[in-house]
């Protein structure tokens, strides 16, 4: 959309913006920035001139000039020579005070840099399991000469890796052959291949709500229509109940999922049953069995994202989804257990489906890098080596984060995860986007709750990874406390949304 906004219209949108909690130019910039992120101020709209807005607001032109300059510096306004400033979203790392290179990645948007000195709470990822990864690549280099006479293209993936992945499934109770494995460049690549093959444009895809943001982005980018099914609230309502402290699980609303499958008849369903992102829940086997049966009855292909399955913090027991029916498609990856930089993922499915996925894959690329796959084969075969130490550290980080939230943000209600990398928090007010907007000013970066939903849901929620060490988690929570205090002093930054009932997650 393009057009222009007159001073009176912008003034109405701003509301009571100047409450004296910080310098006037910063308060004005904060509210305009929030209006852009909220969608209340459309993109590519020309804002009023500095002189006309200053006159309408009854403030000095210097204040408006400084506010516009700050918004341009942060990447929320663009203007050409002699033209009025236009609203926009940062796309190439807008400048940000305190960072050497000025890169600010907008709450969860992909592909932008994070400035030095900013604690990143938008990504839930770990650094590499250093020595283990290095050793795997050293071994891969000794095996590479045997493959050099070949062309190097393999849409299915190199044999040693496919055999190693198949053996892992077989050991977990799901008999699998190498012919049932397709190696991909990460789980996101795998999902795009599956979407292209099974859903097609305008196809329906059932998803949990909330769900993994990059999966929602992929579904939308494929032209598919997400069919959302809300996940129930955590039993007991939050962090201050004994059940929540003990890791009580609300599970999934299977009746709602069965109803959606049978009534909507989506072509595929995408679920994260193993330490769900963002809630950290583990789907019980009884629910897995019911969900597979409902998918078969509706003619829906069930796609289970298992990228977090190895991050089992509390030793909970579960069976891979594919054990409950042959029509299940499983997605896996080494990104969470070892390192995202490996860019190694896979699809497990029936051999006929794998052949269809391989045919679709060749329209995207002709195969993955060989050395990385050889190294990944060693990592899959020795998967247990780095995990005990990583899981012990993550358990400590999780418990530290929950204690910090209870101590510094007592009105927040975190759900204790049994696995995965993050805590899903209910906030006392619908201010998730506002916190994400303010967060860089306090040295942190957040993914706002609406990134995990459809249609602007989850303003009452925030995902907080516990991938940082305890001392950095403490700094991050203190920064959140300071940002919350600023919001409490600046009611004009809050979204005016109706209250959600405490018993519902979506």
Image (tube, rainbow, N blue to C red):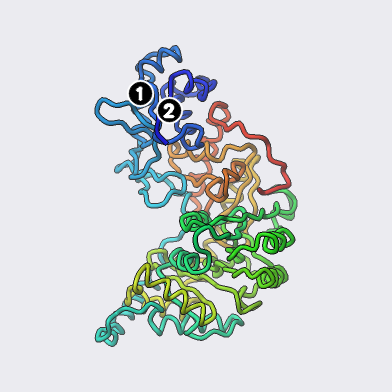
Residue corresponding to mark 1: 66
Q: Distance between the residues labelled 1 and 2?
A: 9 Å
Q: Which part of the image, by quadrant, shows the N terminus? A: top left
Q: Is residue 250 left or right of residue 273?
A: right
**What secondary structure is marked by label 2?**
helix
Instruction: Check disc 1: other Cα within 10 Å, few if <14, some if 14-19, many if 20+.
Output: some
Along the viewing direction, whichever of 287 and 205 lies nearer the viewer:
205
Where's residue 398, x and y in %? 57, 56
Q: Label for residue 455?
A: none
Q: In this view, does 499 lie above or below 126?
A: above
Query: Measured from the top left, where is residue 340 in percent x and y?
Result: 41, 64
Q: How many marks?
A: 2
Q: Residue furthest front?
A: 202
Q: Which residue is drawn at 59% across and 70% down?
A: 301
Q: Residue at x 53, y 61 (%)?
A: 394
Please name the residue shown 37% across and 52% down the image: 111
Between discs 1 and 2, the one toward the N terminus:
2
Compared with 424, 143 (above or below) is below
Q: Can residue 467 be seen in this view?
A: no
**Observer able to see residue 367:** yes
* Quadrant in the picture for residue 87: top left
Image location of residue 78, percent across then percent down: 33, 33
Crowding around mark 2 (Cα neighbors within 10 Å: few <14, some 14 to 19, many 20+) is: many
Q: Residue 40: percent from the left, percent from the top? A: 51, 33
Q: Are marks 1 and 2 in contact (CB under 8 Å)?
A: yes
Tell me the SS state at disc 1: helix
| Disc ID at residue 29 | 2
Residue 102 in the figure: left or right of residue 184: left
In the image shown, does 67 or 265 lie closer to the viewer?
Answer: 265
């Amino acid at each position: 959309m393009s057009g222009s906004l007159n001073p009176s219209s912008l003034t109405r949108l701003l509301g009571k913006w100047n409450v004296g909690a910080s310098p006037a130019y910063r308060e004005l910039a904060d509210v305009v920035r929030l209006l852009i992120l909220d969608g209340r101020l459309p993109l590519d709209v020309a804002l009023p001139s500095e002189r006309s807005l200053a006159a309408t607001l009854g403030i000095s032109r210097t204040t408006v000039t400084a506010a516009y300059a700050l918004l341009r510096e942060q990447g929320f306004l663009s203007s050409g020579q002699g033209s009025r400033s236009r609203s926009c979203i940062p796309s190439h790392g807008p400048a940000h005070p305190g960072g050497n290179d000025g890169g600010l990645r907008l709450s969860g948007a992909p592909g932008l840099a994070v400035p030095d000195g900013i604690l990143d709470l938008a990504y839930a990822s770990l650094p590499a399991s250093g020595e283990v990864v290095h050793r795997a690549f050293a071994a891969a280099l000794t095996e590479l000469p045997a493959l050099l006479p070949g062309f190097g293209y393999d849409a299915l993936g190199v044999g040693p890796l496919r055999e190693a992945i198949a053996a892992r499934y077989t050991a977990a109770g799901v008999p699998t052959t190498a012919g049932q494995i397709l190696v991909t460049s990460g789980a996101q690549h795998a999902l795009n291949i599956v979407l292209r093959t099974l859903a097609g444009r305008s196809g329906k895809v059932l998803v949990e709500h909330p769900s993994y943001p990059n999966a929602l982005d992929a579904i939308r980018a494929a032209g598919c229509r997400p069919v959302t099914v809300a996940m129930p609230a955590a039993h007991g309502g939050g962090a201050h109940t004994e059940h929540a402290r003990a890791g009580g699980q609300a599970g999934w609303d299977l009746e709602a999922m069965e109803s959606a499958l049978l009534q909507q008849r989506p072509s595929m369903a995408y679920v994260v049953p193993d330490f769900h992102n963002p809630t950290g829940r583990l789907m019980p086997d009884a629910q897995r069995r019911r969900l597979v049966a409902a998918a078969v009855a509706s003619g829906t292909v069930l796609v289970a994202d298992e990228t977090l399955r190895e991050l089992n913090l509390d030793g909970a027991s579960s069976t891979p989804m594919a054990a409950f029916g042959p029509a299940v498609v499983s997605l896996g990856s080494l990104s969470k257990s070892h390192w995202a930089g490996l860019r190694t993922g896979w699809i497990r499915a029936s051999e006929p489906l794998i052949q269809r996925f391989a045919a679709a894959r060749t329209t995207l690329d002709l195969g993955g890098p060989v050395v990385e796959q050889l190294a990944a084969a060693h990592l899959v075969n020795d998967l247990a080596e780095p995990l005990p130490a990583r899981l012990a550290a993550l358990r400590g980080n999780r418990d530290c984060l929950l204690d910090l939230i209870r101590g510094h943000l007592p009105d927040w209600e975190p759900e204790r995860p049994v696995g995965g990398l993050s805590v899903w928090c209910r906030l006392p007010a619908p201010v998730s986007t506002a916190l994400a907007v303010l967060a860089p000013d306090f040295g942190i970066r957040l993914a706002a709750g609406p990134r995990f939903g459809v249609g602007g849901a989850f303003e009452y929620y925030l995902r907080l990874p516990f991938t940082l060490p305890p001392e950095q988690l403490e700094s991050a929570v203190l920064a959140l406390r300071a940002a919350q205090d600023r919001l409490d002093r600046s009611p004009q930054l809050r979204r005016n949304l109706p209250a959600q009932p405490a018993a519902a997650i979506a």
